[in-house]
Image: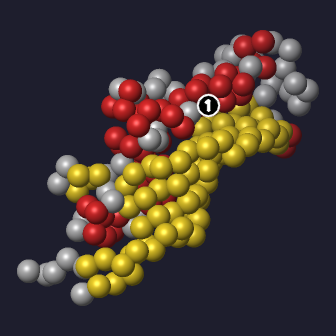
Amino acid sequence: MKAPFHAAYSGTLTITISTPRARVAPSMKFTAASVHEDFTAAVRVAMREYKHCGPTSEFQPATLRIQNYFPTHEGRPIYALRELSPDGSARSLVPEFMLEVMTVRYRFFLVLLPAALIADPQIVEAYERNIEYAVRKFFLASNIPDEFIPGDETLRPGDRSDISILCDLGASDGRITVELPGNG
């Protein structure tokens, strides 16, 4: 039986870091003042498109490609990342909680591969969770902390910077007609 199959999606990946501040005014201590910039730079270097998409990604070690952290079915990948482009960043201050917040956004284009037709549908359809998990594992392999970045302990002992990874899936960008696998 032939049926339409949505095989391509675009979306936005948002990486947010929230760092406690000692005071509302910007920090004059270099280590505290540069936490956001250092994190943003590390993320931007790690997320460069050529490291994850197209033939240039083959020159990167397998552990340093987001693709290798997506789920598979019987060893075959079910997704392929085709585009990963910067979509801007925003910096803000939340004075009531004494937090400095930086968000770094990326647009992506994800294609479902043939294994997606026979893999467990609940795994395949959990796009957001799978993308967030893959980026978190990729960050760990790239030595980008996924839970906190140590700040200047002398400013506010015990506090830390929290990092959040959030995927927003957009509309399907491609539909194909496929032969559905049989039950037998």
On the question of residue 138 being in view, the answer is no
Q: In which quarter of the image is the N terminus?
A: bottom left
Identify the residue at horizontal 66%, vertical 37% (top origin).
17
Q: Quadrant of the C terminus?
A: bottom left
State the image coordinates of residue 165 (x, y, percent, origin top left). 56, 45
Going by the picture, which residue comes out furthest to the left?
Answer: 184
State the image coordinates of residue 77 (x, y, percent, origin top left). 29, 52
Q: Is mark 1 on a helix, strand or loop?
A: helix
User: Tag 1: residue type?
Assistant: Arg
Q: In this view, does 108 lie to the left or right of 104?
A: left
Does 110 sit above or below residue 58?
below
Q: Quadrant of residue 120?
A: bottom left
State the image coordinates of residue 39 (x, y, percent, origin top left). 64, 27
Q: In this view, does 65 lie to the left or right of 93?
A: left
Q: In this view, does 89 lie to the left or right of 3?
A: right
What residue is disc 1 on?
44
Does 107 sit above or below residue 155?
below
Tell which of 154 and 182 is nearer to you. 182
The colour scheme is secondary structure
On the question of residue 105 being in view, the answer is yes
Identify the residue at horizontal 86%, vertical 14% (top origin).
28
Does 98 sit above or below residue 25?
below
Tell which of 102 and 152 is nearer to you. 102
